[in-house]
Amino acid sequence: MMPHDFMVYLASSSSIPPPFPWATNKRGTIQSLENLESKQITTITGEVQCRHCEKVYQVSYNLRERFSEVENVFVTRKKGLRERAHPVWTNPEPVRCELCGRDKAVKPVIADRKSQINWLFLLLGQTLGYCTLEQLRNFCKHSKSPRTGAKDRVLYST
C-alpha cells in the first residue's frame, strides 16, 4: 500500500460526526431500536422532493410503527426472499406530493456524500431502492457485510 493510499484508507475509516440525532459516528452503523427509544428518539425525519413542483419538504415517520412494518416484511416473507430484496424495495413507488397533490411524484432526497445519507429514514420509508448500487455497496462495506452482485441482493444485505 502506497502512503497516499494509506492516508485515503485512514480518512475513510475514521469516525464521522453523526449527521442526524439517530445516527452514529461510524459509517454503516444504525443504532438499535432500544437504544433510540432510550434516548427518546421516536420520530425519524427526512427530506423528500416532488418531481413536478420540485419543492423539498420534510416527512416524519413514527419509529416504532415503521420499524414494525419493515420487520413484518422480513418475518412474513423471509423464505420467499432468497437473499433478494422484496420487489417493493427494489422499485419503490413514488408517493403523492403533500404540497401540489400530484400522485406518484415524491422521492426521498439522498445526500451526495455517502456519509450524509439518512439510512434509517430510507429504511423506515422502504425507499432504499432509490439508492444507487454504489451507495448500497458503500453502506454494506462500512457495516462489515460487503456484498457484490445484483442490486436486489445488495439491497437485501443493506
Image (tube, rainbow, N blue to C red):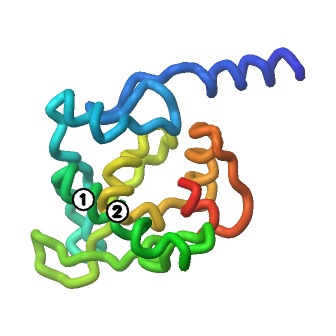
Q: Which mark is residue 66?
A: 1
Residue type highlighted by circle 1: Arg
> How far is the residue under mark 2 from the one under mark 1?
6 Å
**Image height check: is 93 above or below 137?**
below
x and y percentages locating residue 102 in the rendered image: 18, 82
Direction right: furthest residue: 1
| SS type, badge 1 | helix
* Residue visible at 20% across and 28% down in the picture: 39
Q: Nearer the viewer, residue 21 or 157?
A: 157
Contact? badges 2 and 1 (CB < 8 Å): yes
Quarter of the N terminus within the rendering? top right
Tell whether 26 sits left or right of 127: right
Tell whether 55 sits left or right of 76: left
| SS type, badge 2 | helix
Count residues near mark 1 (Cα–Cα under 10 Å), then give few for <14, some for 14-19, many for 20+: some
Q: How many marks?
A: 2
Within the image, what quadrant is residue 53 found in? bottom left
Q: Nearer the viewer, residue 3 or 151?
A: 151
The residue where tag 2 is placed is 70
Q: Nearer the viewer, residue 55 or 91?
A: 91
Within the image, what quadrant is residue 108 found in? bottom left
Within the image, what quadrant is residue 79 found in? bottom right
Count residues near mark 2 (Cα–Cα under 10 Å), then give few for <14, some for 14-19, many for 20+: some
Quick check: can you spot residue 58? no
* Residue visible at 26% across and 53% down in the picture: 47
**Image height check: is 3 above or below 78?**
above
**Image height check: is 58 above or below 28?**
below
x and y percentages locating residue 157 in the rendered image: 58, 56
